[in-house]
Image (spheres, grey):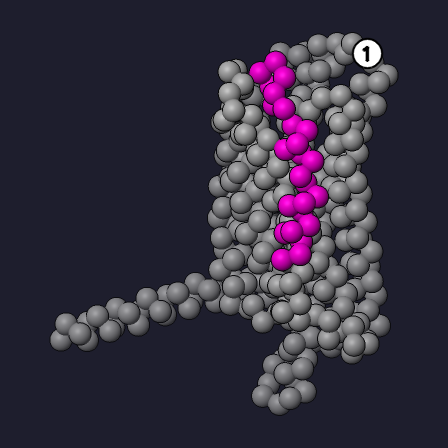
Amino acid sequence: MSSSILTNIQNQLSLYGYPICLILGNIGNIFIVMVFIRQRQNACTIYILTSAIMSDLYVNFNGFVQLFPFYYRDETPFEFFLCKKRPYLTNILGQLGNTMLILASIDRYMISHRNATIRSLSTPKRAKWLIFFAIIFWLINCIHIPIMQTIINGRCTTYGIYTTIYSIYSIIFVGLIPPTLLIIFGSLTYHNMKKRHIRIQPISNNINDQHISIQRRDKDLFIIVLCEALLYIITTTLFPLMLLESMISQYIIINKSVQHLQIESFLFSIVFILLLLNSSLPFYIYLIGSKSFRRDFKQLFIDGYQKLKRQQIVQIALRI
């Protein structure tokens, strides 16, 4: 494939891919917030709610950065500030979204455990504290990015040995730790649920059936978390592989050919769109994978219609 064809495809991906991610992400994440904000008494839904907010911020911030690139020609103090803050904020938002997914997966493991003490660790109050500590952790852990990021020849980039360090950091915290934890706790949760043989029955008014209803909600939330974990693994796998290739090739190939650089640029453009899709598609994955989420989403519109209808009745009564 000639370099001109790759460049043309890359331009088309940027022209249509990023706007599509922005539209899908904003609509989907807003609906996730609207559905789960009414279920804040559950620790897992708090994690999912926070993840949707972080994902929406990530999609908008990173999407606009890709759509409207800034050129650092004058190297003014403002341009240095912008160069350092853009990757810092993008990294924090992305890592917080990943962390919320991991915490939700751990929460599903705890709530499905046979030990009552472990199940009791899953509380909304503890979830809020963990979210607070996660924000503080990533604010501190990502501080190396604005320190080492700088402008070189009109480009906001890294330099020297830090380029390799940052690649290793990204491989570990994006491509290694999150998928490993998601696979471990997803497998443990599935094993716990299989051992408990949870039976899903229709809801009635007695206490036993209410307990079964709670178990059904826990199982549905596990399906939602599992679907998003699979989406994360699929959409982020290429990112650490590309970083690893770029890191190794810079030491093996002293002077990369123009074609090699264009191929790398093309593949990285695909990687960035996949990362945006990871934050844009959860709502649609929930709709496909979870019957309870489809029911809650439908109920959202029913409640909104009934509320609007009541307001119209009140307005008519006041006029009379």
Identify whether 288 is placed above or below 94.
below
- Residue 56 spot, x, y in % from top left: 54, 46
Question: Magenta part of the protein: which range?
Answer: 132-156
Along the line of sight, the residue nearer the viewer: 208 or 175: 175
Identify whether 45 is placed above or below 216.
above
Q: Residue at x 58, y 56 (%)?
A: 50
Q: Which quadrant would residue 307 be assigned to in this image?
A: bottom left
- Could one spot residue 125 in this view of the protein? yes
- Could one spot residue 273 in this view of the protein? no
Along the line of sight, the residue nearer the viewer: 52 or 286: 52
Q: Residue at x 73, y 34 (%)?
A: 239
- Residue 274 falls left or right of residue 257: left
Neighbour tally class for label 1: few under 14, some 14-19, many 20 plus, Cα within 10 Å: few
- Residue 10 spot, x, y in % from top left: 60, 22
Furthest toward the front, the residue is 77
Q: Which residue is mark 1?
A: 254
Q: Residue at x 48, y 48 (%)?
A: 27
Along the line of sight, the residue nearer the viewer: 43 or 74: 74
- Residue 195 falls left or right of residue 265: right
Q: Residue at x 67, y 45 (%)?
A: 140
Type of residue at label 1? Ile
- Residue 4 spot, x, y in % from top left: 62, 11
Does the magenta segment cover residue 146? yes
**Principal secondary structure, stretch drawn in magenta:** helix
- Residue 177 spot, x, y in % from top left: 79, 46
Does the magenta segment cover residue 147? yes
Along the line of sight, the residue nearer the viewer: 146 or 182: 146
Q: Which quadrant would residue 280 be assigned to in this image?
A: top right
Q: Which quadrant would residue 271 be assigned to in this image?
A: top right
Identify whether 175 is placed above or below 208.
above
For the C terminus, give its image quadrant.
Answer: bottom left
